[in-house]
Amino acid sequence: MATIAASFSAVILPKYTESHTSLTSAFTLAPRHGFLRKNINTHLRLSTTPGTNGVRGRAVCRAANTAVEIETQIGMAKPAAVLPFRIGHGFDLHRLEPGLPLIIGGISIPHDRGCEAHSDGDVLLHCVVDAILGALGLPDIGQLFPDNDPKWRGADSSVFLKEAVRLMHEAGYELGNLDATLILQRPKLSPHKEAIRSNLCKLLEADSTVVNIKAKTHEKVDSLGENRSIAAHTVVLLMKK
């Protein structure tokens, strides 16, 4: 909490006090409001109150339960959006249907069924795309590549990932590391994991030492465990170049 408060003071106060050098500041940060970031359920409202003994005012930061917004009576003061690193999480799930190809990480996997989807249904690449977009604070894959757009019908999911990587570099970041977990009852992915990781590294323009792929069954529980669906989770760390 001390680090957060110090960061807040370092980023917000200089901008606020450039034209208000006489302000005295006091901040109250509730423990549950640990992140000064947009789009979380925290509201930090900066207001001014009359001062005494020649002091023009007092800045008070109080927490509420809406989107983050920092405001003053004389204007807005926003923290810089440039961060040394960003973390993103992605999730995807597809129904498995007989007669369709099963593609995971851009690799065709022999199986009696595959993913039903608007594109090629690559659950891993979709998941990785969402993790990168999430880390960058961008719209998700469904917004950038909507499933009601005919041009994405049957599309190779590597197209989506290449665009996410382009956006990552455009924002000034590179992949720190990636950890993905595939969840499916069948088929066993052990014989295919290295091929999947190798292709994913190529698409990400990343070294194999920073990309990890795990595979789990679902202990025959629900649609995942009954070989009726496949899911994936991915966490990425992006580092500022």
Image: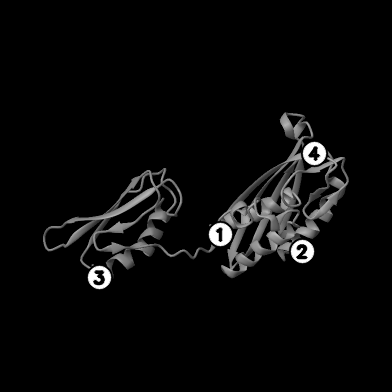
Q: Secondary structure at mark 2?
A: helix
**Which comes before the other along the chain, label 3 or label 1?**
3
Q: Secondary structure at mark 3?
A: loop
The total number of labels drawn is 4
Rendered image quadrant of residue 31: top left
**Which comes before the other along the chain, label 4 or label 3?**
3
Q: Position of residue 190 (x, y in %)?
A: 84, 46
Position of 29 with respect to 133 (left or right) is left
Q: Determine contact: label 3, label 1, CB under 8 Å.
A: no
The disc label shown at residue 29, or none? none
**Which comes before the other along the chain, label 4 or label 1?**
4
**Which comes before the other along the chain, label 1 or label 2?**
1
- The residue labelled by disc 1 is 136
Q: Amino acid at mark 2?
A: Lys
Residue positioned most to the top:
221
Instruction: Single out the mark in the foreground, 4 or 1.
Output: 4
**Which comes before the other along the chain, label 2 or label 3?**
3
Rendered image quadrant of residue 232: top right
Instruction: Single out the mark in the foreground, 3 or 1.
Output: 1
Is the residue marked by circle 4 packed among few (<14), some (14-19), or many (20+) residues within 10 Å? some
Position of 83 with respect to 62 (left or right) is right
Q: Secondary structure at mark 1?
A: helix
**Which comes before the other along the chain, label 2 or label 4?**
4
Position of 26 with respect to 109 (left or right) is left
Q: Position of residue 1 (x, y in %)?
A: 41, 50
Query: Could you tell me how far apart the alpha carbons at marks 2 and 4 are, in whole angstroms?
Result: 29 Å
Instruction: In this rendered view, identify the residue nearer to me: 163 or 13.
Output: 163
The disc label shown at residue 202, or none? 2
